Amino acid sequence: MSKTKRFGMPNLFIRYVKNTTMKKLNQGVFLLFILAITFVSCEKTLPGAPDENELLDRLMEGLTNTERLQFFRGDEAFGETFTAETGLGFLDAVTDAFLIALSDPNDTNGNGISGHPHYTNIPSYVDVRINAIPSNGKYITRFGKKGAAYNLLHQTSGAYNQDMGITSIFEPIDPATQLEVDPEVSTQTVNDVVAYLKTLKAPIQRNTNDPAAVVAGQQLFTQIECSGCHTPTMETGFSPISALSYKTFSPYTDLLLHDMGPGLDDNYTEGHALTSEWKTLALWGLGLSFEAQGGMVFLLHDGRATTIDQAITFYGGEATGSKNKYDQLSETEKQQLITFLKSL
Ligand code: HEC
């Protein structure tokens, strides 16, 4: 049973849990969602094996035996605590140079979008990327809602600590007492969870041949500049995991920070991000989230939007131009765009 679960909430681990107002509820929320997901998976997986592209909790192809073994150990440890966002290994393996090339901090192309990497201080326990491009002692960080976590070890130790109150060798301070305590989760378990997250396969787009909706929707996505932040295609650099090395993939994020205006400013920050700045959320796997939860999703950093259309109503700042173009679409065009997004 546990191995057939679908991650109905691919954003829960990182997108949903860091909000300060949600923190107290986190443990309960985790449990509820894990229960809900388990329930859904029983219903959906019993009649027959689901298509491979309907499943997210699978390991990627091309792994070595050691990488596979660690995946399964991590799967077990992870399942006890979190639900997953998938394809993170690919995002982890993108080079700093790639992210810098995507950024346009001074909006030199004049499209109103000025995304920039999040440069911040990193903890001593993370291994710096071989191709890192630091600036004034700060490094480009990329995980979490504000992109303030450097890599999956930083993100995972932080989630154990701040979201669950569990200390590790990496984050030894108990957030409740502010005192250093013995590790409550073993280093091996943390490392296994990191390896598991790294080797979960990327979501695969579905219904790509549906010309009326998916193909037309994809064109609209570019035309109204959703793609200005939700970058359709990225490439990885070298990775010691060969299945992740020099790969092209489609996350629909640029991993950069954008000022999203007052509607999304909730006075909360991490690292050096402004309170109105958020990292572009990846849109891959979006359609599977809708399906796995019977049409219910919780979008944006605090889950405040339950439809794609509603999410866009909160847009301002750098996303104003794109939002205005969206508002001018006909109902048919909006439907095409949404059908495309749900194919991701
Ligand atoms: C200026 C950059 C920018 C543009 C342009 C933009 N987005 Fe976003 N998008 C973001 C950011 C940043 C977030 C995360 C906001 C948050 O966490 O509250 C986001 C979040 C989303 C989400 C929520 C995803 C989730 O899992 O919660 C959807 C859906 C989305 N965008 C769709 C679109 C569509 C459709 C367009 C085009 C009309 C668009 N975006 C244009 C930056 C942008």
Image: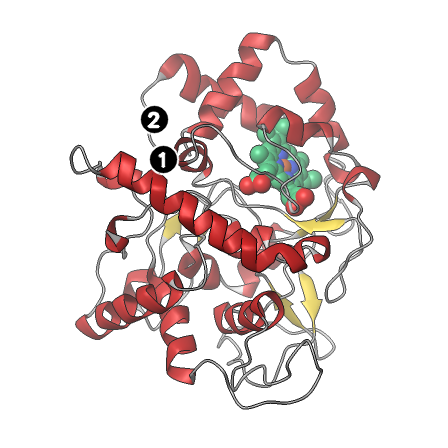
Residue at the spot 72% in from the left edge and 54% down from the top edge: 21
What SS does tag 2 mark? loop
| Residue 93 or residue 123, whichever sits in front | 123
Which amino acid, by three-letter code, is at mark 1? Gln
Residue ID for mark 2: 208
Q: Can residue 138 be seen in this view?
A: yes
Q: Is residue 294 above or below residue 103?
A: above
Q: Is residue 128 above or below residue 254?
A: below
Q: With 77 as the anchor, is 147 left or right in this view?
A: right
For disc 1, the neighbor class at 10 Å (few under 14, some 14 to 19, many from 20) is: some
What SS does tag 1 mark? loop
Quadrant housing residue 14 = bottom right
Image location of residue 53, percent across then percent down? 28, 39
Residue at the spot 45% in from the left edge and 52% down from the top edge: 85
Residue at the spot 35% in from the left edge and 55% down from the top edge: 247
User: In which quadrant will I find the C terminus?
Assistant: top left
Q: How far apart are marks 1 and 2 (CA)?
A: 7 Å
Residue at the spot 75% in from the left edge and 44% down from the top edge: 108
Q: Is residue 229 above or below residue 189?
A: above
| Residue 288 or residue 23, whichever sits in front | 23
Quadrant housing residue 224 = top right
> Do the CB atoms of the residues marked 1 and 2 lie less than 8 Å apart?
yes
The label shown at residue 205 is 1
The label shown at residue 258 is none
| Residue 217 or residue 22, whichever sits in front | 22
Image location of residue 40, percent across then percent down? 35, 38
Ligand 1 visible in quadrant: top right
